[in-house]
């Protein structure tokens, strides 16, 4: 039976998910909520469904699941509300910027028995999945070192930065999740450095725009994460996993596959411009996975626990930049 | 207003087009016809629409356009029938295996004023379009030499070969069209060689499975086409255009973008397996272009004339293999 | 015992070989001859050895072998002279522009029992050797189709063209030799087209600057050769061999291995500028192979017969452009 | 005037330098010293020169310069001895494992006015130089982040590890030097993690075989270094520099440039096997640069100060792994 969706929030990421729902078998877009009427209407025009308020959606009998795409500070309350309303919940990362609030929220989810999936779309990217499948197939032996590179094409406006929770909770959080996925064991320590090299306004807002992180696990596996709010050549998304028998990596996506050769050399086009184009397929696959989890009453691939742990790593990274030392995950988890 | 489609023939390529119609804005799949009831039903189940006979579709008021995906020897008659019935016609290549029959058919199309588009989907591939756009933008100066490589992953069954019209009319015909598109002027001479290296049964059926062709134009531009019914590494589709200021080429599509490095070296996955996956996007873009042509009453990007000229080149190639000399296109056109 | 060399002709290619001799174990540069005193002196300054006349070198007891780098029309006479003088002879291609003169010359070589090696340096390129070794190792199964691309960075002066014997005898001759090497069997038919697209002066001189050739063998193997006197991106030298189990190809050599990524895309440097840099290693390996052949009294890797056959293919290509038909090698060999 | 060399130590790296001296214009190998007679003899046989003791070389009038390739714990004493003997000194890294001993040694060098060059051959690699030249040419704007990857093909024997000073002083020291070169400013803080994943015997010997380092500068530039004593696919040597206008990276060197395509995918050969092959050209260029510095009495490209600073960074990295915090370079320099 098709899962009937309500999409909460019709901004950029809300539209990405509405589009994904439209393209996935077994998913139907039933309702859209957004306090900005024009935004709701634009999404409705593009993808269909009714326009309702959030409370109306919570009380609707014809809604099986919601996708939470509202501002971060509303996520945890909405998860609570919809878990109690008996809806399956897909929530964009992060659940909350505060670790304790996330834990409370996960307790509510557990008590209600609701399905909760957290939006880490990179796990559903076909190339990253092929890379992970190669690891699972033993192609590189035991994982030893993971290298993640994520660079945004350009810095967001400071107004976005101010509400983002900072680079580690907003941007690196995706890499933290990928690191956990690729390492195949929990992270024990986090060391991070951050600088302000791209936009001085970001520094004034108290955030970094350039960061490097080293993660270690109990068995000595290591992971580095390189982040920048600048990549003139497009949205840079790379993974390299090194193991006892070999390495596996994944190539970036360009805007086309042509190459021009002339006196200046051989030139291939820049990368896809940002996450909406780069992860187009992943967003659809993510919703499809959520639909399957709801239909089969199984645990989603990216759970509330995954959401919590990525946030904990972000918190540890932030503390590391303040103290200049490697922070143990256990310190944050308490 | 949405264009209402009838799809004639629910085989492999019919399903490709039914799927494309489903995914294109402004296109609606209204009816499907296939003498094999199970095939029609399967297509209906997957993509919707009514099941009707071909004549019913021709007489339907709720059909604006048809996509002809029936066996080759029915193409010309169906074009005639539907052009006279006032429908816009999209026909898979070739229009017919016989040059004169194609000409008669095009005369009927002209008389009826029907829109006719011939299915050369490669012109709608985003990468090939990017390559052609680079030429148009002057990136390589004047085109001098074109190199086309098309290799099928494996040979089709002999039963297919026998009705195919031979490798030049069945397989190279796409390259002939691409050559005309890339050279930007008509071909004057055709030289071709063919061998039987892949499957002796193909040779017994009087066809080649390996071929090379050289085309020349009046101004001295040259094009080579390499074809094989074998490519163990997947569906090989390459274009390289060399001009006075530089060259432009296009990379193949792999099944994923990972690369594994170990003691055996660096290995990337094989190519996509065949045209349905490689040209998935192109088929949808092709139907979208047809829809636009019908809606705006403009000439489609690939006309009946394009269909004729590609067939003429195939005919010339075949004669060249028989005579061992370069055959002038004018000899075939008469 | 070291082989003592005389180098005949101290022009561009003479210097390449003098340098190669200097770098090869078991080779000593003993004498240089050039009618232009300044050229001989420059070579001597750079690489050592005495300056002598050609006749002096022929009569020298301290010369074991000569490298003939004089103008083409002197090659055959010099081979005759030095074979009779009991010297081992390494001769730059072609032996002569006339097939019958080559045959006479080879007869002299046979009668004298002299060692004769013809300069097809591409056979000694480490990458091309790795490619050929992969074929020998069965990596691609039976060879079916060979694709050769050779483009010079720019056209030579017309004065050079006029004495060159034309593009097939001067430039394609290397590809003809590589084709024979890669196909592993003799060529049966040759079809060629030529155009004048790069420099009108070349056309006025009666030569082509752009050419495509198709070769076939008795068992149906096929080879295409693409040549141009223009490649704005450097010296383009590619081989692709397609077999029953797979394909093997070889990448071009760039001026460095860096890649710059910015808003214009990803750019790698142009290719090495011409044969002296691209085949630097090959020239040394070629002389080393000659030294070994002389020392061990074994047949060199590239014989006078190879020189003859490459010339015959060039002659066939030229006749093909005049007649518009595939020319049988047997027609030329008589 | 040619610089007459004495090579101290005829082991693996001594032979590399003896070979480089043989191939460089303006350099002559005059004498070799090694306590193991067979090693000295082998080097003499391969590259020429007399066999002398170290003291004999120090007292020889026909020696202008020495290359110190003896065990690390002799480096500083030999630099002292030969600086006082009025010879120019090229010393393999590190000068000593102890920072204070290095400083004393540099004081002696300063007092004697001797030329001292420290062997960081990567600065002379043509590709790395092309990369650095691109930075200097402004191609990527201001440097922001540097990513260095160095993986050895396999772990050395524990006997080597025990005398090596540990991974940071033995292996990472090259990356520290490259980091300083690429960042263009001094490093301020060092954070490092190390694990024992490749060979337990290395762990028992108190060393790491897998390490990651983050460096920062006063202006907030960042650099990560990834090291492993394992790379099944060959000697992995990569640099990526990210700047305000773009990025520049350098490709690894493979054993050949062929690519084989078959049902398993597209496979290119493994990388060159180790530093002797990968940096063959760099070693010669390094000696050539030393020769020029000696001849022109100018400061070499890699000075004693560079040797000191790389060692200081190694010391800081080691302390960081013990304390779990970022160590300031100033703490080590005192």
Image: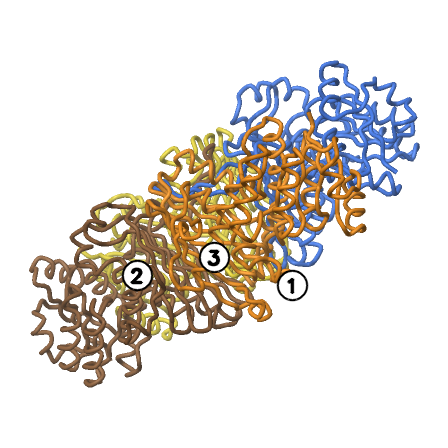
Chain colours: A orange, B blue, C yellow, D brown
Element marked by disc 1: loop
The residue to which callout 1 is attached is A157
Residue D212 is situated, as x and y percent measured from the top left of the image, at 36, 56
Residue closer to the observer: C219 or B136: B136
Write down the residue under mark 2: D323
On screen, B283 above or below D237? above
* CA gap, disc 1 and disc 2: 38 Å
Residue at 54 percent of width and 30 percent of height? B230
Q: Quadrant of the N terminus of chain B?
A: top right
Q: Which residue is mark 3?
A: A226
Q: Position of residue C34 (x, y in %)?
A: 36, 68
Numbered disc 1: what chain?
Answer: A
Q: Are marks 3 and 2 on the same chain?
A: no
Same chain shared by disc 1 and disc 2: no
Q: Residues within 10 Å of mark 3 (few under 14, many from 20)?
A: many
Horizontal side of D80 relative to B162 (left or right) equals left
* Circle 2 Cα neighbour tier, 10 Å, few/some/many (<14 / 14–19 / ≥20): some
Q: Which chain is indicated by disc 3? A: A
C249 sits left or right of B93 in the view: left
Q: Residue at x 55, y 39 (%)?
A: A126
* Gap between marks 1 and 3 measured at Cα: 21 Å
> Viewed as shown, does residue D84 lie left or right of B218?
left
Q: Residue at x 26, y 68 (%)?
A: C49
Is residue C207 among what the camera can see? no
Q: Earlier in the sequence, mark 1 or mark 3?
A: 1
From this view, report whether residue A36 is shown above or below residue D83: above
Can you tell which of label 1 and label 3 is closer to the viewer? 1
Which numbered disc, 3 or 2, marks the residue closer to the eye?
2
Quarter in which the C terminus of chain B is drawn: top right
Calculate the distance from the C-alpha at mark 3 to the C-alpha at mark 2: 23 Å
């Amino acid at each position: 039976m098709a899962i009937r969706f309500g999409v909460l929030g019709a901004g950029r990421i809300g539209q990405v998910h509405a589009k994904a729902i439209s393209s996935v078998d077994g998913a139907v877009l039933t309702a859209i909520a957004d306090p900005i009427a024009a935004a709701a209407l634009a999404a409705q025009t593009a993808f269909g469904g009714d326009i309702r308020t959030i409370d109306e959606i919570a009380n609707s009998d014809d809604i099986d699941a919601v996708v939470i795409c509202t501002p971060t500070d509303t996520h945890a309350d909405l998860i609570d509300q919809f878990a109690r309303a008996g809806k399956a919940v897909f929530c964009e990362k992060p659940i909350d910027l505060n670790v304790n609030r996330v834990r409370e929220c996960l307790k509510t989810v557990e008590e209600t028995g609701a399905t909760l999936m957290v939006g880490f779309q990179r796990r559903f990217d076909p190339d990253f999945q092929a890379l992970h499948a190669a690891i699972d197939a033993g192609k590189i032996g035991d994982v030893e070192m993971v290298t993640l590179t994520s660079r945004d094409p350009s810095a967001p406006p400071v107004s976005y930065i101010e509400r983002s929770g900072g680079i580690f909770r907003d941007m690196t959080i995706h890499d933290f999740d990928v690191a956990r996925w690729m390492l195949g064991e929990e992270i024990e320590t986090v060391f991070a450095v951050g600088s302000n090299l791209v936009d001085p306004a970001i520094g004034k807002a108290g955030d970094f725009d350039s960061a490097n992180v080293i993660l270690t696990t109990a068995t000595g596996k290591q992971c580095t994460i390189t982040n920048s709010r600048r990549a003139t050549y497009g949205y840079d998304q790379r993974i390299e996993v090194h193991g006892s028998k070999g390495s596996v990596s994944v190539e970036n996506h360009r805007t086309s596959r042509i190459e021009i050769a002339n006196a200046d050399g051989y030139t291939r086009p820049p990368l896809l411009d940002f996450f909406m184009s780069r992860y187009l397929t992943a967003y659809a696959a993510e919703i499809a996975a959520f639909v399957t989890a709801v239909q089969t009453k199984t645990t989603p691939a990216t759970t509330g626990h995954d959401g919590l742990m990525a946030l904990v790593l972000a918190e540890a990274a932030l503390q590391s930049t303040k103290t200049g030392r490697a922070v143990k995950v256990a310190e944050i988890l308490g």
